[in-house]
Image (spheres, rainbow, N blue to C red):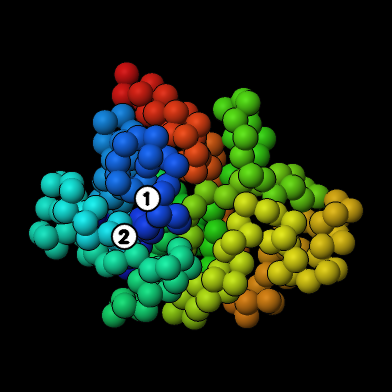
Amino acid sequence: MKGRADRFTAVVLAGDRTPDDPVARAAGVSCKALVPVAGTPMVMRVLGALDLARDVGARMLCGPSRTAVDEHADLKALIESGAVQWMEPQATPSTSASTAMDSLSEPGPVLLTTADHALLTAPVIDYFCSEARAKGCDLVVALARYELVASAYPGVRRTALRLRDGGYCGCNLFAFLTPPARAAAAFWRRVEHQRKQPLRLITTLGWIAVFRYLTGQLSLGEGLARLSRRMGLSVEVVMLPFPEAALDVDTASDWTLVQTIAGERGR
């Protein structure tokens, strides 16, 4: 039996950023969400982890296309049974997130993640949700220290935000804890094309922040304070102790890596 009554509604973004995703092409499937990892499509792995998490209630899937859903019997069955709510993906991840959250009738907390988070597990989800609640703010972002990820997976290239107090990797987990926080998707829409370019992302905080970033003076705390003011919300982070949480599948080499890790877990 699942835990507390005020569980998170989980929104999973499963649309492709491009019509010919290179990872889907390498795997020989119609969309990235259906790329198999250890024999199971990534989207099914993510939905399964969410189902096992104590802190997650309803699950909403934004994408893949109806045609792709119909190609996979188990995914189609989950949706048709009502266990997972499905909606068509929008033009971009931010508009998908915004549309999905706007469609929710309940004002409770929302957990946002992606279908390519192939190594996501229930313990990671529950850790993040519990720690996010304890922050007492509007919006919480999951990060992992770059040193942790590099130590666990030497030689693997990850985009990192390098600040005065260290390097940080995104983990594709976001907690929208209050109704006003859902408006953050509009801010994301303006900056999402810069997600893999940390310097350009910093420009959204103003030129003082850019100068401090370039000179190694910008700290995580200062960046969060500036972001909070910019968005008109209180924004905090949860530092995850799970290096695998920073591994999503953006490239064919990422796919090879998560396949290896998932295979080792299986053994």
**Quick check: marks 1 and 2 in contact, CB under 8 Å?**
yes
| Relative vertical location of residue 102 with respect to residue 130 in this rendering, above or below | below
Left or right, 127 with reference to 143: left
Amino acid on which disc 1 is placed: Ala
Residue at x 57%, y 63% (from the top left corner): 192
Please, what secondary structure does the residue beneath circle 2 have? Answer: loop
Mark 1, other Cα within 10 Å: few <14 / some 14–19 / many ≥20:
many
Please, what secondary structure does the residue beneath circle 1 have? Answer: loop
Left or right, 238 with reference to 61: right
* Residue 186 on image: x %, y %: 53, 76
Q: CA distance from mark 1 to mark 2?
A: 9 Å
| Relative vertical location of residue 64 with respect to residue 250 in this rendering, above or below | below
Mark 2, other Cα within 10 Å: few <14 / some 14–19 / many ≥20:
many
Say which of 199 and 19 sits in front.
19
Q: Quadrant of the C terminus?
A: top left
Q: Residue furthest top?
A: 267
Say which of 258 and 90 sits in front.
90
To which residue does mark 1 refer?
115
Q: Can you see residue 46? A: no
Frontmost of labels 1 and 2 is 2
To which residue does mark 2 refer?
63
Counting residues from the start of the chain, the first of labels 1 and 2 encountered is 2
Q: Can you see residue 172? A: yes
Amino acid on which disc 2 is placed: Gly
Left or right, 199 with reference to 103: right
* Residue 126 on image: x %, y %: 39, 50
Residue at x 75%, y 66% (from the top left corner): 203
* Residue 208 on image: x %, y %: 85, 68
